[in-house]
Structures are given as C-alpha cells and as structure tokens.
Image (cartoon, helix red, strand yellow):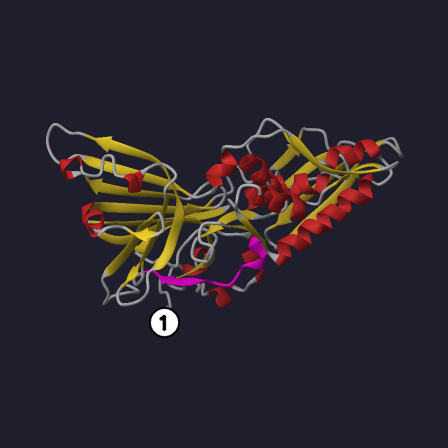
Amino acid sequence: MSAFPQYAPEMRLRFAGRPAPAALRGSVTGVTCQTGMGDADRLEVSLANEGLRWLDDPLLRLDTEVSIALGYAPDEPRRLFTGEVVGTEASFPSDGMPMLRVVAQDRRTRLAAASPARWFGVPVPKLGVFPLPDPVVAPVLAIEHGMVPLLDPLGAFLSAALGVVDVVASAEDPSMRQRVVRRQQSETTLDFLKKIAVENAWELIVEHDNEPSGFVLRLMSPAGNLSSDVTLRYGRSLMEFTPRISTVGQVARVSVRVWRPEIRLELTVSVGYDWDRQALTIEVTPGFGLPIAGGAEVLLVDEPVTIATAPRLIVAKLLPRLNRRTTASGSCVGDPRISAGRVLRIEGVGETFGGLWRVVSAQHTLDGGGYRTSFDLRKEIWFDGIPPAAQGAVRVQGGLLSLPAPNS
C-alpha cells in the first residue's frame, strides 16, 4: 500500500523565479532529481521539442535559475531542488519527436569551478602563524561563492575540540604549527571543502526546502541527526530493498606513526572500532607495532603525520570505512520527504537490516510510469548506541516477523 494512496502526483517547475509556462509544462515528458552528500545535486528535465519550439527559448539558457517541487494534490508540493541550468542536449531523430534535455546543478558547481592557491592562517608577531579554525575556514569558502553556511552545533563543537588538539600539540613548535595551517593548492574549492568536511566528520548538503532555497550549504554532523524523518515498511510503503553487509575490505582500525622529537621516539597510534562492544578503541605503542589480534584488517597511513595532525587524519580514514560496512539500495512510491542526509526507519526486514539508515543519495523520477523514489543508504556507527527495538528493528523468529503497528 502506498503512503499516498489516494492522491495524484503534482509538479511545480519554475524558471528564472517564475512558474514555467503552460506550454512548456505540457511538453515535459519526464523529470529526474538527484540529491547527494558532497557533490552537486542534479535536475534533468526532458522536453518533447515539437517544431523545435524550445530549442532557442531564453528560459532554457545557461545559468538560468530553475527549481522543482513535487508532491501530491491537494497538499503543497515539497521543493526538492533549486539550481542553475548548466547544459542542454538536443536530439534530432530520423523517426519520432525531437527531444531536448535540460540539465541543472546546484550552486556547489561554483565551488568546483574555482581553484585559487592560498593558506588560512593568522600571523602573530614573534610567535609565527596560527591556523584559522575549520568552523571559520569552511563558512568562508561558502560565503565567497554566494552561499549561506549552516554549521550544526555538534559539528562545531567536535571541530573545535580537534582544533584545540592542533594548537596545544604545536604550541612550542613553529614548524609544526605551519603544518596544521590549511592550504589550498592544486585543488578546487569544492574538493578543498570536502577534505575539511571529512576530517571533521561533516557531510555537505544543500538545503532546497528551506529559504533561501538552494543557497544554504549545511555542514551536517551525522552524529547529531539520528531521529527518523520517514518510516517505510516492507510489503507496504517500501517497494524494493536490497541491503548488504560485508567485512571484505573492512578496516578494523587505523594506525599512524608519529615521531616525537623531544623524546626521540616513534609512536604508533591505533584507533579502531569494536563491533561487539560498540566502542572506539585507542592504543599507543612505542616504535612500529600493530598489536591487532585475530587477523583484523589494519590501515597503516604511510604519510607524514605529527601529533597535531594525527586526530583529523584518523577521523578522515576510519569513519568513512566503518560506515561502509552495511549499505543498501531501495525504492518506494514517490516520497518528496526523502533526500540526502535524512534518516529512514526501515521496518519489516528483520533486526540486522531493519532500523535506522542514513540516505546517502536519493533520486526522484516523474514520467509516464508515475512518481517513484529510489535511494542508497548506509548504516552508521552512530546508530549502534540506539537499541534495535527503539529503531523499529524486529528480530525474525521461526521464519515469522511481527510487524509493528503503523505509526506514520
């Protein structure tokens, strides 16, 4: 049964801030809107180009603002995308109707087009250069390209804590302070921002359903966003679901070698995650040692590391790998509430694969086959602290599954 059984899909398409003309809406044969974490969101609009009427239409020129909202009448459609036209593609078949495909992306494309060389430090007389904290650097990158940064409180706190480690560890060593100063060189501003996000356990998401639509760049901390936004049940609102869990290539811990000149000793710092106890583990051993039992996989970071840079490097290397242990893909009847960064509660698929999932990417498609939503998901270590029952995950016993009563 659909979550919206009695309603017909409704689309609202706008170009240059105005509703698309009725003739253009009537020519739309399909739309696809994809949102994700990190790279730019994307909208594709396919038009029947009868008589080549849309080929040179000024509404479809490059850099024109375009937005789309989807939903079900009589409710107000939910805005899923606001961005700018970045390309058009025409087809002139020997048989059939000429077609025109309009492609738009969100404003992260502006960050991807810029690649200045610079550093983010504050010169202090007689003391040297001190690094600007990441909660300052990241918003600056967004603001200079016309976007409004929004940093989650927990993300700001964790980043500040890592920043304190940077400053304290390098306080007496000017050369070490130089190494923790952020430098952008031979990379786009978007890649530079993504690197900062990874090292602070942030995700980059553009907010389309909040004003100013398409301009808000959210630096989201997944650890602070754990409550479910949408509930889907297998056999009801969840049409297809393909979860997978694998330890192939799974890293148990990350180890870095740190040279301490004041004691003339190399230390091996290992940080891992104990799946049985659902807890982070930290070990520091002198010299080059990897005290891992049971043949667990270890990622040895073979690059220059200091005691100041080690924490961020470990976060950047370990967390993404832990969050790739359990992943899934699925689809449902079109649901405009589902977008990148949201949390889905999946019910009716057992305890291992049920419960809370993070939406990594979501694709909304409206065409002659109707409105449907497909998505890619991941289980995060942050969800492990929530009991399965509280997540809506029910264990299968004797081949029978007890579905909870509907609550949405």
Q: Residue 402: x, y in percent?
A: 38, 68
Residue placed at 59% from the left, 30% from the top?
Answer: 116
Which residue is identified by label 1?
A: 406
Q: Quadrant of residue 314?
A: top right
Number of other residues with Cα within 10 Å of mark 1, as a class: few under 14, some 14 to 19, many 20 or more: few
Q: Quadrant of residue 347?
A: bottom left
Give the structural element (helix, strand or loop) at label 1: loop
Viewer can see residue 242:
no
Image side of residue 53 versus residue 127, left or right = left
The answer to whether residue 345 is above or below residue 119 is below
Total of numbered circles in the picture?
A: 1
Q: Which residues are magenta?
A: 220-234
* Front-most of residues 79 and 377: 79
**Residue 27, magenta (yes or no):** no
Q: Residue 261: x, y in percent?
A: 86, 31
Image side of residue 325 versus residue 174, left or right = left
Please identify the quadrant where the N terminus is shown: bottom left
* Front-most of residues 71 and 228: 71
Residue at the front extreme of this rendering: 58
Q: Residue 193: x, y in percent?
A: 58, 40
**Residue 229, magenta (yes or no):** yes
The answer to whether residue 145 is above or below residue 239 is above
Residue at the left extreme of this rendering: 95
Residue placed at 42% from the left, 53% from the top?
Answer: 339
Residue placed at 37% from the left, 65% from the top?
Answer: 401
Please identify the quadrant where the C terminus is shown: bottom left
Image side of residue 214 versus residue 308, left or right = left
Viewer can see residue 334:
yes
Amino acid type of the residue tagged 1 in the rendering: Pro
